[in-house]
Image (cartoon, rainbow, N blue to C red):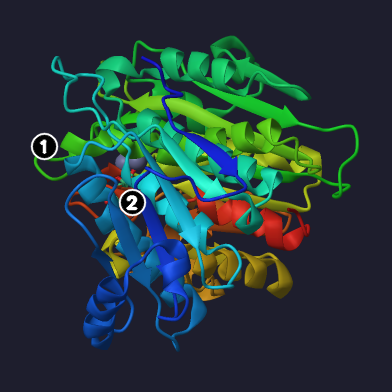
């Protein structure tokens, strides 16, 4: 499969081309004749203006013209998300009209509007057709034309690589277990991240054994497919951060629950998505290295499946994580925290500036806030976390902070080992996070993406099934935190 499947390019032009379908972003009804919008059409837009911020199609024949009308005031992130939503509606029309290119013109004087519209259209075009015999339903759009005064070349490249990485993450997560086992995933990391200033090490089982990674090895015991511990390091010659940012991702390519087997319907049947955290890390490293950002970043991905073979680890087992902590396994379905324990311990050797982990870790996080945000836990500084939250709001991958209060630690005390991998019946996302915290000694953020990573109905430009959540938020965070672009 071609995991890197984005087929769309961005072209920058000086002047608005003729005979191309165009989206006009407007916030006033003045001077629209200079964009060849007739007085009748202006009257039509005016007639609709009571709708607030809205979009309309001006004509039914080629070249099509669409208008996004922006009315103030609204708080900025909400307004921009509204605009992305309108662009998603326009993208639906372009699909019916089988357009192969579209121009976006921002007349508002508010910088960057065409980027938001282009991003939404790009992301809305995503399809996962690899296993369909009939490819004729493929969207035709392959070019977005932007007028150069609204976007620099560097911004256009950023947008392109960002969207490309979201596509890659969606492809990886949507790819079923039959086509993405540990070995294929490890190979995909090699092929996607082999870029300048990147070194990749995929530790095999022997190496993992020598590092005594008892979390990863135990979860893998029920499987015939060996585990992989993938470390991807991007270190450009000059970088703004002395100590690296470490990104950790849960890479469970399939989670049956192990001997504590999951039910099939609405549970195990979508557990191909349980490597979404690792996929985000791959997508981010690929984007960061391709854009040659001056930031030192390391990705760490423990990769395994969680199966029920004769050797499978069992409830009641005691296992030893690579840092020496003994864990009583009370539930084999709480496997994510076990493999992440080894990864978070491994991250210590970098004395990182910040560690961010992404994991489809708990159904509890999903039940708490659904698909509309990411549950976050942190020991990092207020400044670091504020920058992440701001980034999350900007791109509408919103973060909700949950507590890491000490009291929750009591729930993972074990009678016979140092800790156990299961808390009480409440606060499941938090007891999982408390478990992870045990293996950290650096500024850390844990994102439980079980809710937003994989959705079951169409959700605007986020699409259906894998969303790629996390990529846009971290890229925006890097932009804010290091003054990039
Ligand atoms: N992979 C699941 C969590 C999950 C749930 C991801 C829904 C995506 C959507 C995780 O390994 C798991 O099974 N967690 C258990 C933990 C429990 C046994 C403590 C859960 O949340 O039920
Ligand atoms: Zn599980
Ligand atoms: Zn899992």
Spatial CA span between label 1 and label 2: 26 Å
Q: Are marks 1 and 2 in contact (CB under 8 Å)?
A: no
Tell which of 199 and 196 is nearer to you: 196
* Rendered view: 387 above or below 361: below
The residue indicated by pointer 2 is 462
Q: Quadrant of the N terminus?
A: top left
Tell which of 343 and 407 is nearer to you: 343
User: Residue 266: which quarter of the image?
Assistant: top left
Q: Is mark 1 within 8 Å of ligand 1?
A: no
Q: Residue at x 20, y 41 (%)?
A: 97
User: Residue 289: which quarter of the image?
Assistant: top right
Name the spot of residue 259 as percent of width and height, x first: 23, 32
Name the spot of residue 377 as percent of width and height, x first: 53, 65
Name the spot of residue 342 as percent of width and height, x first: 58, 36
Q: Which mark is residue 264?
A: 1
Q: Is residue 290 left or right of residue 434?
A: right
Q: Residue at x 75, y 54 (%)?
A: 484
> Which badge, 1 or 2, comes first in the chain's sequence?
1
Q: Is residue 151 left or right of residue 329?
A: right
């Amino acid at each position: 499969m071609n995991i890197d499947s984005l087929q769309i390019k961005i072209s920058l032009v000086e002047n608005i081309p003729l005979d191309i379908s165009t989206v006009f972003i407007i916030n006033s009804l003045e001077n629209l004749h200079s964009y060849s919008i007739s007085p009748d059409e202006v009257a039509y837009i005016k007639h609709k203006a009571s709708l607030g911020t809205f979009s309309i199609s001006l004509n039914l024949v080629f070249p099509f013209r669409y208008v996004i009308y922006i009315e103030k005031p609204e708080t900025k992130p909400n307004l921009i998300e509204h605009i992305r939503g309108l662009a998603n509606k326009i993208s639906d029309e372009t699909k019916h009209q089988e357009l192969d290119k579209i121009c976006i013109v921002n007349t508002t004087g508010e910088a960057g509007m065409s980027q938001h519209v282009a991003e939404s259209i790009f992301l809305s075009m995503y399809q996962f057709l690899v296993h369909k015999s009939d490819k004729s339903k493929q969207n035709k759009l392959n070019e977005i034309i932007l007028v150069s005064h609204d976007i620099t070349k560097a911004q256009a490249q950023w947008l392109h690589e960002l969207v490309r990485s979201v596509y890659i993450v969606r492809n990886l997560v949507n790819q079923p277990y039959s086509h993405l086992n540990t070995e294929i995933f490890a190979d995909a990391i090699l092929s996607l991240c082999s870029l300048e200033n990147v070194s990749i090490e995929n530790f095999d089982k022997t190496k993992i054994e020598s590092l005594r990674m008892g979390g990863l090895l135990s979860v893998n015991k029920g499987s015939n497919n060996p585990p992989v511990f993938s470390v991807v390091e991007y270190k450009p010659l000059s970088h703004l951060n002395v100590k690296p940012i470490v990104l950790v991702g849960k890479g469970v390519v399939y989670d049956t629950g192990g001997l504590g087997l999951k039910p099939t319907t609405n549970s195990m049947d979508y557990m191909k998505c349980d490597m979404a955290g690792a996929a985000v890390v791959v997508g981010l490293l690929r984007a960061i290295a391709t854009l040659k950002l001056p930031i030192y970043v390391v990705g760490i991905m423990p990769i395994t499946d969680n199966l029920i073979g004769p050797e499978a680890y069992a409830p009641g087992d005691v296992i030893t994580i690579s840092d020496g902590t003994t864990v009583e396994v009370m539930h084999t379905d709480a496997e994510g925290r076990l493999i992440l324990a080894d990864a978070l311990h491994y991250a210590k050797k970098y004395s990182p500036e910040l560690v961010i982990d992404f994991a489809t870790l708990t159904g509890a996080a999903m039940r708490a806030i659904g698909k509309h945000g990411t549950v976050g836990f942190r020991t990092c500084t207020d400044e670091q976390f504020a920058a992440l939250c701001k980034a999350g709001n900007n791109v509408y991958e919103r973060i909700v902070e949950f507590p890491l209060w000490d009291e929750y630690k009591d729930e993972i005390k074990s009678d016979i080992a140092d800790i156990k991998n299961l808390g009480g019946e409440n606060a499941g996302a938090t007891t999982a996070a408390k478990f992870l915290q045990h293996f950290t000694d650096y500024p850390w953020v844990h994102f439980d993406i079980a809710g937003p990573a994989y959705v079951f109905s169409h959700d605007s430009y986020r699409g259906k099934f894998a969303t790629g959540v996390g990529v846009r938020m971290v890229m925006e965070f890097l932009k804010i935190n290091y003054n990039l672009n």
